[in-house]
Image (cartoon, rainbow, N blue to C red):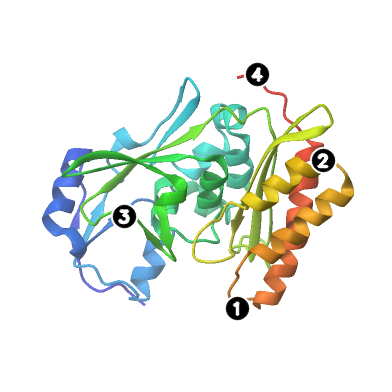
């Protein structure tokens, strides 16, 4: 199928893009990589009257290291993130998750901002931002605001972004780069969206977990931190028994849906298996990287 007719604009600056968003609001869609948006338009699941193509807004494509944070512009391609030394050094969980995204053409054209705004709960990037406690920089006619990742994702394919606002940047904390990290997922075919994914970060000291962070993908309308599981790991120690107990509790805590791809019961089973696997991998591969 082909998309319904629309007016096309290709601004060169953030200010031009914001001006267009303010003018058209709900009537407009923003095009970045188009890897999620174009199928939606082609199937006419969305029929905007205006398309604002921000691919010429070069000021939104960058990766910059700041003290304690890595700033990534919304238009930065996933392929650039995959091969960025700054990302692999300072945010290895993001580097690992990028390697799992779709296929080469998708990563070549897809952008970090597009993935975040599309807000598919099965996608890797939203889960990474929740696991790491990343922040989103958003600008609109009322000025700029910074939104925590756990507040950014509201529901399936829905964020707190207003129709006249533009996502400018994602800020990742680099304080976790010395943690053991893992991102594991299960998909029926290579390149498909995962049925379930688990991100894990573990800090170990004196033969125990000093801190832990786990987040989910594909288990409800948005990524979720498994805080009770994190506390279990910290309290119960490094043993295999504690890992299996934490993984079992993770499966009890999630509230997956059933759909054409998998039942809720199968997703709970995957949650237990993948949580255990993520904890094992994160505990086995602490990345001793200097900040």
Circle nearer the N terminus (3, 4): 3
Residue drawn 58% across and 27% down?
Answer: 175
Task: Tell me the CA gap for discs 4 and 2.
Answer: 25 Å
Residue to which mark 1 is pinned: 258
| 59 relative to 139, above or below | above
| Image disc number at residue 31 | 3
Q: What residue is drawn where x is 51% and y is 45%?
A: 129
Q: Position of residue 201 (x, y in %)?
A: 67, 40
Front: mark 3 or 4: 4
The Cα atoms of the two marked residues, 3 and 4, are separated by: 38 Å
Neighbor class of circle 1 (other Cα within 10 Å; few <14, some 14-19, many 20+) is some
Q: Nearer the viewer, residue 162 or 94?
A: 162
- Looking at the image, residue 276 sits to the left or right of residue 95; the answer is right
Relative image position of residue 60 (x, y in whole percent): 33, 37
Task: Residue lying at the far front in this picture: please name it.
Answer: 235
- What residue would you read off at disc 4? 290
Residue 237, numbered circle: 2
Mark 4 or mark 2, which has the lower sequence index? 2
Mark 3: which secondary structure?
strand
Element type at mark 2 = loop
How would you rate the neighbour count of disc 3 (Cα within 10 Å): few for under 14, some for 14-19, many for 20 or more?
A: some
Q: Residue at x 52, y 53 (%)?
A: 105
| Lower position in the chain sequence, tag 3 or tag 1 | 3
Which of the two discs, 4 and 1, labels the residue nearer the N terminus?
A: 1
Chain-order first, disc 2 or disc 3: 3
Q: Pointer 2 and pointer 3: residues touching (CB < 8 Å)? A: no
Image quarter of the C terminus: top right
Give the secondary structure at mark 1: loop
In front of the other: label 1 or label 2? 2
- Which residue is rendered at x = 23% and y = 68% of the image? 48
């Amino acid at each position: 199928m082909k998309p319904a007719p629309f007016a096309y604009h290709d601004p060169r600056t953030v200010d031009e893009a914001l001006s267009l968003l303010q003018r058209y609001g709900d009537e407009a869609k923003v095009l970045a990589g188009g890897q999620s948006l174009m199928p939606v338009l082609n199937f006419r699941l969305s029929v905007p009257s205006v398309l604002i193509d921000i691919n010429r807004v070069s000021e939104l494509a960058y990766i910059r290291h700041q003290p304690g944070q890595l700033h990534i512009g919304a238009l930065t391609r996933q392929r650039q993130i995959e091969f960025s030394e700054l990302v692999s050094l300072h945010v290895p969980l993001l580097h690992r998750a990028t390697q799992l995204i779709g296929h080469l053409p998708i990563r070549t054209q897809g952008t970090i901002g597009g993935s975040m705004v599309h807000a598919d709960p099965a996608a890797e990037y939203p889960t990474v931002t929740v696991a790491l406690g990343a922040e989103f920089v958003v600008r609109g006619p009322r000025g700029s605001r910074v939104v925590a990742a756990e507040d950014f994702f509201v529901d399936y394919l829905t964020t707190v972004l207003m129709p006249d606002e533009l996502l400018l940047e994602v800020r990742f904390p680099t304080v976790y780069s010395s943690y053991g990290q893992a991102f594991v997922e299960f998909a029926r075919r290579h390149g498909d969206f995962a049925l379930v994914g688990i991100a894990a970060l573990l800090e170990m000291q004196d033969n125990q977990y000093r801190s832990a962070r786990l987040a989910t993908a594909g288990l409800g309308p948005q990524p979720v931190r498994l805080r009770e599981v994190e506390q279990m790991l910290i309290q119960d120690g490094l043993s295999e028994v504690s890992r299996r107990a934490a993984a079992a509790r993770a499966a009890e805590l999630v509230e997956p849906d059933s759909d054409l791809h998998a039942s809720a019961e199968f997703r709970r089973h995957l949650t237990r298996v993948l949580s255990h696997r993520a904890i094992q991998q994160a505990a086995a591969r602490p990345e001793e990287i200097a900040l």
